[in-house]
Image (spheres, rainbow, N blue to C red):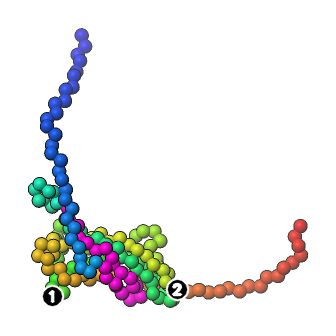
């Protein structure tokens, strides 16, 4: 006689759905013109988003600053390779507000193919999504931002080469 195994699954009541609430805080102004050396542009759509479990008030996703950084190379004779950007949050004394140790700094890289190099007059847009210090959100003591852009300059050259040619007889 062979044995038969019967698996029975007992299911209890379904767990209640967890509702996540996204709290969005706008920054004023929402867009700012920026200038760093030969790089000019603006950062737009700045806001801080924090995700919280509605029933418990527990932070599910810590606050992050998002926006779009648009840059243009204003040089007439140099190309740039965009490397990285970093945002510092400044308090009412214009001192940096520290980010919690468990989180990374507010840096980002320009890594999309083609957007990291800007020839004279070219523009690029880059999404910014970086950590935001919880202390600045709770105390509402944020009074400024400092954007640092790292880029490498390349001389932009255009040269012409002239060479002689002549038209011979018609080829068959």
161, 25: nearer the viewer:
25
Give left or right: position of 119 versus 44: right
Residue 23 percent coordinates (x, y): 19, 65
Residue 134 sits inside the magenta stretch: no
Please tell me which of labels 2 and 1 falls first in the chain.
1
Cα distance in 3D space between marks 2 and 1: 41 Å
Say which quadrant the N terminus sits in. Answer: top left
Give left or right: position of 41 versus 25: right
Give left or right: position of 90 versus 77: left
- Report which residue position mark 2 lands on: 156
Residue 44 sits inside the magenta stretch: yes
Q: Which residues are magenta?
A: 31-51
- What residue do we see at 14% from left, 35% from top? 12
**Which corner quadrant of the image does residue 105 belong to?**
bottom left
Tell which residue pokes out farthest to the top in this image: 1
- What residue do we see at 71% from left, 86% from top? 162
2 vs 1, front mark = 1
What mark, if any, has residue 93 been given in the picture? 1
């Amino acid at each position: 006689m062979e044995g038969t195994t019967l698996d029975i699954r007992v299911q209890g009541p379904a767990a209640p759905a967890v509702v996540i609430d996204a709290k969005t805080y706008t920054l004023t102004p929402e867009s700012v013109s920026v200038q760093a050396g030969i790089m000019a542009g603006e950062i737009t759509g700045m806001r801080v988003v924090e995700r919280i479990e509605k029933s418990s008030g527990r932070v599910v996703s810590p606050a992050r600053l998002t926006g779009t950084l648009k840059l243009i190379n204003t040089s007439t004779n140099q190309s740039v390779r965009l490397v990285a950007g970093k945002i510092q949050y400044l308090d009412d004394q214009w001192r940096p507000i520290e980010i919690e140790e468990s989180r990374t700094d507010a840096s980002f890289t320009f890594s999309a193919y083609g957007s990291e190099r800007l020839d004279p007059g070219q523009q690029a847009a880059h999404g910014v999504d970086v950590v935001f210090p919880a202390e600045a959100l709770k105390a509402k003591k944020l009074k400024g931002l400092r954007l640092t852009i790292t880029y490498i300059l390349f001389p932009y050259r255009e040269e012409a080469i002239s060479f002689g040619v002549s038209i011979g007889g018609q080829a068959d």
